[in-house]
Amino acid sequence: MATLTGNNGAITLNGNNVAAVRNFSIEMTADTIETSVMGTDVRTYVSGMSSFSGSADVYFDAADFDTYETTFNPTTGLVGAAGVAVKFYIEQNYASTSDYAFTGNVIVTGYTVNSSLDGLVEASISFQGTGSAAYSTTAV
């Protein structure tokens, strides 16, 4: 059984690396539609539409401020833009010929900068998928 570690993860948006990624999560869900009818004692369902969404946390680096501002600004950047190509590497394997990643298109729904007295300045990115997410082992 292969064991993957999070330290080899990475994220790209429209082919550009997102710097200083701390963590990310992807949630894939499917709706259920009830098909139960009167006269039965058991509920029945069929599968409905599916979707994916998630978030990522990054360290906010002042040297990258101009890049982030351009990338995530709601007026000129990716926040609110539809069809942003995203790739979430759960294992970006530099020593072999393949990576393990989830890919898809998303709307970046938010970009939040967080600062606290006793911590580093971080930023959170949230997204909503605009189609299906694919898991693959892809050639480097």
Image (spheres, helix red, strand yellow):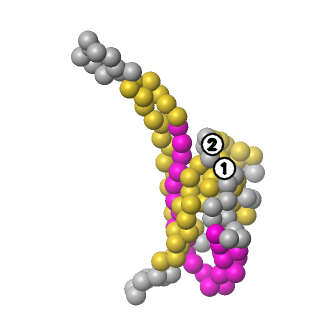
Q: Quadrant of residue 78?
A: bottom right
Image point (68%, 71%), residue name: 75
- x%, y% of residue 123? 53, 73
Range covered by the magenta-colored residues: 50-74
Question: Badge 1 is on which residue?
Answer: 105
Query: How many labels, in total?
Result: 2
Q: Residues within 10 Å of mark 2 (few under 14, many from 20)?
A: few
Q: Which residue in the rendered view is the most extreme toward the bottom?
A: 117
Q: Is residue 22 visible?
A: no
Q: Residues within 10 Å of mark 1 (few under 14, many from 20)?
A: many
Q: Which residue in the rendered view is the most extreme toward the front?
A: 38
Q: Is residue 49 magenta?
A: no
Q: Quadrant of residue 67?
A: bottom right
Question: Badge 2 is on which residue?
Answer: 131
Please say if the residues under marks 2 and 1 sit with CB atoms less than 8 Å apart: yes
Q: Is residue 135 left or right of residue 95?
A: left
Q: Is residue 132 visible?
A: yes
The secondary structure type at the circle numbered 1 is: strand
Q: Is residue 32 above or below residue 20?
A: above
Image point (67%, 54%), residue name: 82
Q: Is residue 89 left or right of residue 25?
A: right
